[in-house]
Image (cartoon, grey):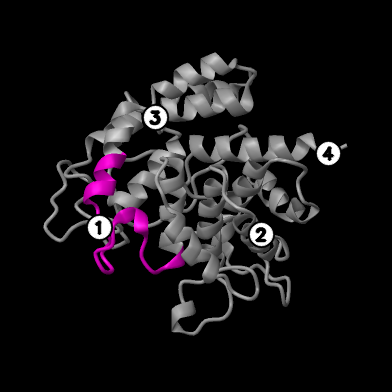
Amino acid sequence: MSDVVTWLLDGDPAIRWQVLRDLTDASADEVARERARVAGTGWGRRLLDLQSGGQWAGGACFPGRDWRAPQPLVGDPDGQPWTATLPTLRLLRALGVDPADPAVRAAVDGVREHCRWEYAGEPFFDGEVEPCINGGAVAVGAYFGEDVEGIVARLLGEQLEDGGWNCEAENGSTRSSFHSTMCVLDGLREYARTGGSLAVSAAAQRGETYLLARGLFRRASTGAVVDPQWLQFSFPPQWHYDVLWGLEHFRSLGGTPDPRLADAVRQVRDKRQADGTWLLENTHPGLAHFELEDGDGRPSRWNTLRALRVLRWHDAARP
């Protein structure tokens, strides 16, 4: 076992079980035992314990106006807060908490019964109006076994001509956004794992082609890098697109990597440090419940795990 894998296994159960599954030859039973710990200890338990009244921070996408944190928060108070229900459920999904765990089921039942969107008071799993938010709601809803068919139908009707989505479409935009497209694809592919439909698969493939045609980070017109920040890796990504999130999405589909991913994979490979780790580079400003890493510029267990499994998948298909 490499020193890097040993270091990863010293982390939270949420990281340990994914390392065992994706980077080692651990048995299915060993992986399952470690995953079962996520809801009962570490980050997963802390997040579940912070729910109150069927939601987190008193709101769906943003904290409620009268909400007061039960503990000191961390991060940048001038950024978008990441403590409400949607970002917290996204994080629990990233941790891989077992949706069937009784504590998790109780938390999700609370969201269904009590959490409403800020836009117009819609029930959480009915979604609201922005594709990036609705993509997140589909991803967490499908993961936790909730009915999100209504949101999926709305998203299919909002796909743009070039294959992606954009939250500014309601204001007249006809060109897709990497951010919005990634959020929607993340939701549609999670939904497809529950059964989905041919229409959902076709829409997802069109969205994926939009990203692939641009090498995951380049302009279709000139080949220039769209945004240098997309080559800096964060965790959690929240709703912000970056190349590592894009590659993780394609890895999750399985199969042979598309040749158009090669440039993006090279960007990830070149970020590897001399000690075999990847850094946390671009934490998105905003208050969070607690720290998951040691800060930007420091080795990141999350980014190292994510990068290693992307490279393992990609390289396994090479001659």
Q: How far, Cα to Cα, is label 1 from label 4? A: 47 Å
Residue 314 x/y as whole percent: 74, 41
Q: How far, Cα to Cα, is label 2 from label 1? A: 30 Å
Query: Quadrant where the C terminus lies?
Result: top right
Q: Amino acid at mark 3?
A: Ala
Report the disc number at residue 202. 2
- Which residue is found at the position 19% from the left and 43% from the top? 72
Q: Earlier in the sequence, mark 4 or mark 2?
A: 2
Q: How far, Cα to Cα, is label 3 from label 1? A: 23 Å
Callout 2 environment at 10 Å: few (<14), some (14 to 19), or many (20+)?
few
Q: Which residue is mark 3?
A: 100
Q: Which residue is mark 4?
A: 318
Q: Earlier in the sequence, mark 2 or mark 1?
A: 1
Q: Amino acid at mark 4?
A: Arg
Report the disc number at residue 116. 1
On the question of residue 300 being in view, the answer is: no
Residue 232 x/y as whole percent: 55, 54
Query: For numbered disc 1, what is the local secondary structure?
Result: loop
Residue 111 x/y as whole percent: 27, 46
Q: Which residues are magenta?
A: 108-131
- Work out whether 151 lies above or below 166: above
Q: How far, Cα to Cα, is label 3 from label 4? A: 37 Å
Q: Earlier in the sequence, mark 3 or mark 1?
A: 3
